[in-house]
Structures are given as structure tokens and as C-alpha cells.
Image (spheres, grey):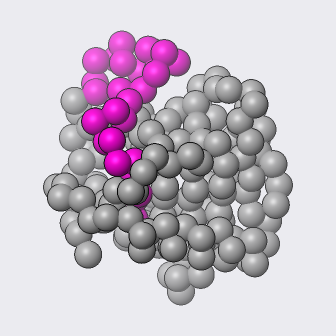
Amino acid sequence: MRIIKNVGSDRLVDVLQSAMPHARSMDVAAADLSIYAVAELLRDATTLQELRLVLPALMQELGYLGGAADRTSRNRLDARAVAAKIAEWLAAVAQVRVARAGIPQGAVVLRGADGEPLQAALGSFALTTDGLGLTPGNPLSFIQASETTEEARSIAEWLSAQWRRSQTQATPARQR
């Protein structure tokens, strides 16, 4: 495993986007989610055909419009358009489930066409701009990214177990 500093050229978003062109599916467990982070992460996700997303039980507490560092994005006054684009994409490819409790750490796995994990990360991050390293975040955040197939497979197995334990949530997104 390698530690991601989440600043400069060593950001989680860069690690994930480098594997994105080869990915067919993505599994994510996140304690928070902002539309600006999701839009940036999925900017080049043209090959993704499936997204399994586990969110915390108290989804009304999600910071959809981001935190203080997202003020510039909010000032563009395009939140409605960004949210509509993400909602359309999620409705087409996403399965959303709710964790039985809070989510203490984030996890993400990108899988290839064969279902094997290509890249995985685990640590103190969420699907927010600071969690992905797009804006300054907590310098004490500890994020690890897989460097081998075995490491990615280990995180993928853990995240799949969390997916099976989570509850189906009635959302506009497709359910399985």
C-alpha cells in the first residue's frame, strides 16, 4: 500500500482518475458526498457502467453543496445543473444502499471488465472536494492506495462485505 498525501500531484482524485479509463464499475463507501466532488471524479468516467454506493444512515446530513472550500464552486451558481447531471448519471448506473450506522472511513474500488479490482483506496476521505484532494483538507487524513492486485482485491472483498450488510434505500437510482 502507498500513502496518499492528498495534496499537489499526490491526490486521491488523480490516483482514481488514472485507473478510470480502464474501469467498468466502481464501489464506494463514503460518509459524505458533494456534487462538485462527484462531478470532478466522474468527469472522465465514460467507461463506467455500474456504481455501487454505500452512504451513511443519516443521509439528510450529507453536505451535497460541499464545505467552506467549495465556496468558489457554489458562487458559479450552477449547482442545480451539476446536480441534475449527476442525478441523471446515477439513475442510469447507480445502486445505492445505506449503512446500518455511520461510515468511519471511506473506501473505493475500481474494477475492470472482468470484475477484477484495478485500483482501491481506503482511509479518512469522503466523496467531497477535500476528501479527493481537490481543495485543501485535513493534513492528518490517512489514505492508502493499493499498489498490487492482491491489495486491491483485499479492499474489494472488505467493501463487498459492507455492501452485502447494507440496506437497500429507495432512491431514484436503480436498485438490485
- Of residues 141 and 75, which is closer to you in this image? 141
Residue at image position (33%, 41%) is 58
- Tell me: residue 38, above or below residue 121: above
Lateral position of residue 58 relative to residue 151, left or right: left
Residue at image position (66%, 57%) is 121
- Of residues 135 and 105, which is closer to you in this image? 105
Quadrant showing the N terminus? bottom right
- Tell me: residue 31, above or below residue 34: below
In the displayed image of the protein, which residue is found farthest to the front?
A: 101
Q: Where is residue 22 in the image (x, y as percent from the top left)?
A: 57, 70
Q: Position of residue 8 (x, y in %)?
A: 75, 31
- Tell me: residue 101, above or below residue 80: below
Residue at image position (49%, 67%) is 162
In the displayed image of the protein, which residue is found farthest to the right?
A: 2
Q: Position of residue 100 (x, y in %)?
A: 38, 57
Magenta residue check for 154: no
Magenta residue check for 68: yes
Lateral position of residue 90 relative to residue 100, left or right: left
Q: Can residue 111 be seen in this view?
A: yes
Residue at image position (60%, 42%) is 125
Count of residue discs:
0
In the displayed image of the protein, which residue is found farthest to the bottom?
A: 114
Quadrant showing the C terminus? bottom left
Query: What span is in magenta?
Result: 51-79
- Of residues 120 and 11, which is closer to you in this image? 120
Q: Is residue 43 visible?
A: no
- Of residues 81 and 28, which is closer to you in this image? 28
Residue 108 in which image quadrant: bottom right
